[in-house]
Image (spheres, rainbow, N blue to C red):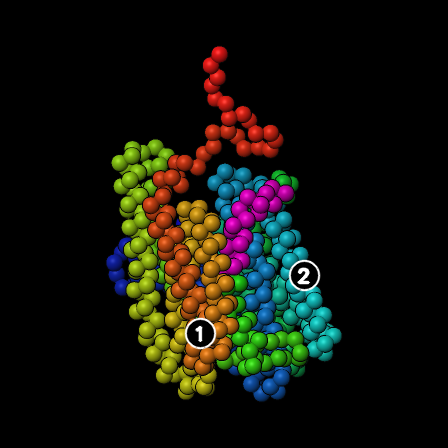
Amino acid sequence: MAGIGIKLSRFFNKDSIVSRVLGCGYSVVVTIAPMLIVIAVIMLMELLLGFAELDYASRELFACTVLYIFIFSLLTASPFNAVISRYMSDLIYDERYADITPCYYTGLLLNTIFSFIVAIPFCMHEYLVGGVNIWYVFAGFFGFMSLMYTFYTMLYLSICKDYKKISLFYTLGMMITLVLSLILHYVFGVRSDIAMLVSLDVGIFITAVLEFSLFRRYFKENSGNYLAVLKYFVRYWQLVMANFFYIFGLFIHNFVFWTTPGHMVVVKTFVCHQPYDMATCLAMFTNITASVIFISRVEMYFHSRYKTYSEAVIGGRGLDINSAKKRMFSQITEELMTLARVQFIVTTPLFLIAMILLPRLGFGGNVIRIYPCLAAAYFIMFIMYSIIIFMYYFNDLNGAVWTSLTFFVVTMLASIAASKLPTIWFGMGLFVGSFTGFTVAYFRIRRMEKTIDIHTFCRGNMLKKGHGRMPSNLVYERK
C-alpha cells in the first residue's frame, strides 16, 4: 500500500476543504470503488430490465447465483493471495522481475485447480438435482471462474500500485455489462435474469482480460522458474492459514444461519437466509469506510514511522533506534484510536439513517431487528483486521494466525449459540468472535512492542540450517 501515501499527502497537506474532499475521493477510488461499481450496476440493471416483474423463483435463483459467485471466489482465492503477495513484494525488492511471470502462472494454476474442485461438484448438483438449465449453470460457473481470475490478477496490479487503472477496468467492464444487458433484453428479447447474468459474465471477463494485458505490459520477461513460489507456501504457511481463516470467518456466521429453520433452499442447491444475509450486507456497508480511513492514515503517517525505525536498525545508534521505536508504536496507538473515533462518528449517523429509512424502503421485520448487532460487530471486526495488518508489518505471522483462527472458531461457535436466541441477538455470534479476535490481536501487538528488540536482533543462527547429523556440542577440550 506504500505507493499511495505520497498522493494522499498532496491532498491532505494543503489544509483546504476541497483538497480533503479530493483526498477522501481518491481513497475511495483505490479501496472500495470496484465493489461499489459492481453493486450499482447490478441494481441499475434490475431497475431498467424490469427484474421485479419476474417470478419469485427466477429472481431468487439469480440472486443466489450472484451471491455464491462472489463469496466462493473470495474463499478459493484466500489461501494463495497473502503468500503470493509476499513473494512478489520480495521479488520487486530484489529486482528479480523475470520471476514474477512464473509466479503469476503457478499461482493461477493452483487457484484454478482449487476453484475447479469446489465449483464442479456444485454445478453438477445444480444441474442433476436442481434441474437448472445447463446453459444457466454454465453461465454461473463461467462468472465464478472469471471473477476468480479478476481477483487474482488484481492482486498483482495492487502490488504495483496501479489502483486507478483497476477502478477504470471495473468501470469499463460494468459499463459493457449494462449496455449488453439492455441489448440482450430489449433487442433480442432475452429474459431479464438471463440477460443480466450473461452480461455480468462478459463484463467480469473483460475486466480480467484488461487486467491481464496490463500485467503482461509490466512484466514481459519470463525466467521459467515456476517452482520457486511453492517454497514460499511451505516457508510462510502462516500467511495461508491467517488469510484463509479471516476470510472464512467473514462468512462462517452466514453459513451457520443457512442451516437454521429460517433458511431458504433454491432449486435444491442454493441455501441462504434472506433476512440475515441482507442485514449482514447493510452492516458491512455501514462500516465500510473503515477501509478508506485505515489505508489513508497508514499511508500518510505510520509508514514513514516504520521506515524511520527500519533505517535506524540498519545503521543508527541505540538511542536513535529506541526513539524511533517509541514513535512507531505510539503512532500505532494513535492510528487505532483515530480509526475507532472517526469510524464511530461515521457509523452513528449511518446507523440512525438506516434505522429510519430501511423500514420505509421495505427492509423491515427481521432485517431491521438483526441489523444493529451486526453493525456493532463489523465495527469491531474492521479494527481487528487493522491490527492484523500491523502484525504483517512486524512479520508476526504466528500472531496473525492465532488472531484469525480465534476469530473464526469463536464466531462459528457463538453463531451456533446465537441462532437459538431471539432474532435481535442473531448478530451476537459475529460480535463475540470479532471482540475475541480483537482482544487477541491487541495483546499480541502489545507483546510485540515489549519484545521488538528480541524479534529484530535475535533472529539469527550460529550455524547454517540443514539436514543431517547434529554437530557436536563440544566447544573446547583441554588435553
Viewer-nearest residue: 30 or 429: 429
**Which residue: 44% across, 74% down?**
427
Which residue has dot 1 on it?
427
Location of residue 45 by image quarter: bottom right
- Tell me, yes or no, whether the highlighted magenta stretch contains residue 236: yes
**Which residue: 43% across, 77% down?**
425
Viewer-nearest residue: 144 or 460: 460
Alpha-carbon distance for marks 2 and 1? Answer: 31 Å
**Which residue: 42% across, 54% down?**
389
Callout 1 secondary element: loop
Q: Is residue 471 above or below residue 167?
A: above
Which residue has dot 2 on it?
117
Highlighted range, magenta: 227-246
**Which residue: 30% across, 51% down?**
331
- Please rate how many residues cluster around mark 1, counting C-alpha atoms within 10 Å: few if below 14, some from 14 to 19, many from 20: many
Q: Amino acid at mark 2?
A: Ile
